[in-house]
Image (cartoon, rainbow, N blue to C red):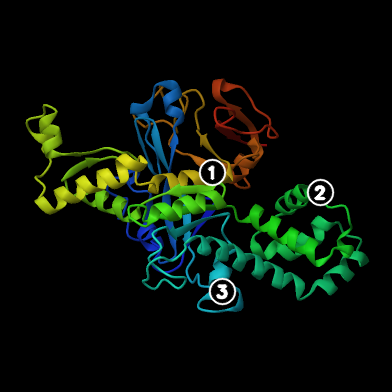
Amino acid sequence: MPRDPLIGLVGKPSAGKSSTLNSLTDASSKVGNFPFTTIDPQRAIGYLQIDCACTRYNLTDKCKPNYGSCDNGRRSVPIELLDVAGLVPGAHEGKGLGNKFLDDLRHADALIHVVDASGTTDAEGKVTRGYDPSVDIAWLRSEIVAWIRGNLMTKWGSIKRRHIAVKATAVETLQNQFSGYGSTSAVVARTLDKLGLKEPLEEWSDETIDRVVNAFTDEKFPTVIALNKIDHPDADKNIAKIAKQQDPNSIVLCSAISEIFLRKMAKQGYIRYTEGSEFVDTREDLIADGDPDGGGLKELDEKNKNRIENLKDMVLYRFGSTGVVHVLTKAAEILGLVPVFPVRNIATFGAGGVGEGMGSNKGVFRDCVLVKKGSTVGDVARKVMGDAPIAYIEGAGGLRVAEDQLVGVGKNDILSFKVGK
């Protein structure tokens, strides 16, 4: 199944980006328990948690995804991630791996900026104390804006002359320039609509161009700020400062190293832990709750027992979770992603034919695709079926739906595509 869109992870060295992405173990053993699975040095498959359609029809025990997993209606859906390496000040001037960083960045539909909230690494990732991490947030954006503006201004005279000669619209002219960043005409149109510019493109001042580039950056590269290392004693003051400067809805507090440790201990059979939860059960906890076998868990040594207790106090109970799972959830939220469930048999929600009973042992809701808010039924058909000719499309209840109808959570999000002319 297609795994669009692509979410890029960025962050300076030692901010914790590698911990967030690369250090999480292979998901093949229990896919739903690991939000990131590395598939090559730069690409990875993340698992976004959503509410599955199986809960609406009391079929949670029959749900068998082809990709990801579904645990009692909480579904883990694959989404592709990109590790964007080389973030250092001056990237737009080619410093460090700047050219590669920006070239990789352009493929992303949204960004997750992993920021060291502890202030214990400087701008280049070297160990220090008292560094202001809000600076990192500002210069990531400034690097992107400087890159786009620099490319635009080097040929602005030619752009204006061509714009006048061919009598193009501002959207057409800018899309010709911004297509290299993975833009679309719709993205450019939304950018200009938000600005409400009155003057024609050929009369734009430098100030107007700056406004356009900044607005385009916001539209093309919406960013989640993942404030990492929240368990460090210096993190609180930095988090408070950043919260006043940035949109609170773009911020997620997290401790990637805590999440990695908990999952490692759970996999080795020392604790019971569900990703995204604030609760951790040890053998002693379960025995105290009346389970004489302690859930079959292994006995913790004193060192790990103390570490887990500290982690509970400093992270889980204080913040509600390690935050790692919520980073992807927030990225999906800012992109407005809608899960859609293609099925072959709309009556049974299965992959088989008409003889298949409701919730057969072949499983229901085998597939799920993520589409952007505002997508139509026809958009989903092309994403799932490609160029195959579609005779008609059925929605839940067997009702036919038109290709121009919008999809949304609970609305036209269970679809069966009938091939034919």
Q: Is residue 384 visible?
A: no
The location of residue 303, given as percent across then percent down, is 13, 54
Judge whether 325 appears above or below 340 on screen.
below
Q: Which label's residue is closer to the chain start, 1 or 3?
A: 3
The location of residue 224, given as percent across then percent down, is 52, 51
Q: Which label's residue is closer to the chain start, 3 or 2?
A: 3
Per the rendering, the mark at residue 196 is 2
Q: Tell me the distance, in whole angstroms, between the alpha carbons under discs 2 and 1.
A: 25 Å
CB of mark 3 within 8 Å of CB of mark 2?
Answer: no
Per the rendering, the mark at residue 249 is 1
Disc 1: CA contacts within 10 A as few (<14), some (14-19) or many (>=20): few
The location of residue 411, given as percent across then percent down, is 59, 28
Give the secondary structure at mark 3.
helix
Please give the name of the residue rendered at 15% of the width and 46% of the height, measured from the top-left corner: 270
Give the secondary structure at mark 2.
loop
Please give the name of the residue rendered at 32% of the width and 39% of the height, measured from the top-left corner: 277
Q: Which label's residue is closer to the chain start, 2 or 1?
A: 2
Which residue is more in the foreground, 179 or 121? 121
- Which amino acid lies under the numbered mark 1 shown in the image of this protein? Asn
Which residue is under mark 3? 91
Is 102 situated left or right of 43 in this image? right
